[in-house]
Amino acid sequence: MMIKTEALDPAEFLDTPDAVAEYLAAAYESGDPAIIADALAVARRSVAIERDLAALFARLDADSPGNGRTLGEIEAEMYGPFGEPI
């Protein structure tokens, strides 16, 4: 019988701005550009960043680009399927 596993996304565990800062600091200490780039991508997906941006957009005027949507939803409207600006 095969054991099923799921991919672990560290972004799910970065739930405070301090956790994001510590994660990024550890990546920068490594000095490895690939690790730093990956850490920046993880930080961008983090729960803390998503929540903070959602809260910021929720406070803005109803006509603002945020309008209570998540950053991912906003980016989906701004970028094409291959990440190029629309």
Image (cartoon, rainbow, N blue to C red):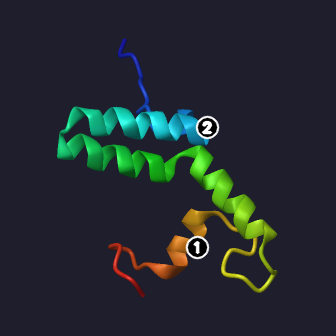
Q: Earlier in the sequence, mark 1 or mark 2?
A: 2
Question: Residue drawn 72% across and 82% down?
Answer: 64
In percent of width and height, residue 6 lies at 43, 30
In percent of width and height, residue 34 lies at 20, 45
In percent of width and height, residue 33 lies at 19, 46
Q: Which residue is mark 1?
A: 74
- Residue nearer the viewer, 32 or 75: 32
Image position of 63 with respect to 41: above or below = below
In front of the other: label 1 or label 2?
2
Image position of 6 with respect to 81: above or below = above
Which amino acid, mark 1?
A: Ile
Provide the secondary structure element on which disc 1 rests: helix
In the rendered image, the quadrant that contains the N terminus is top left
Q: Is residue 5 left or right of residue 19?
A: left
Provide the secondary structure element on which disc 2 rests: loop
| Crowd around label 1: few <14 · some 14–19 · many ≥20 (10 Å) | some
Q: Which residue is mark 2?
A: 15
Image position of 23 with respect to 52: above or below = above
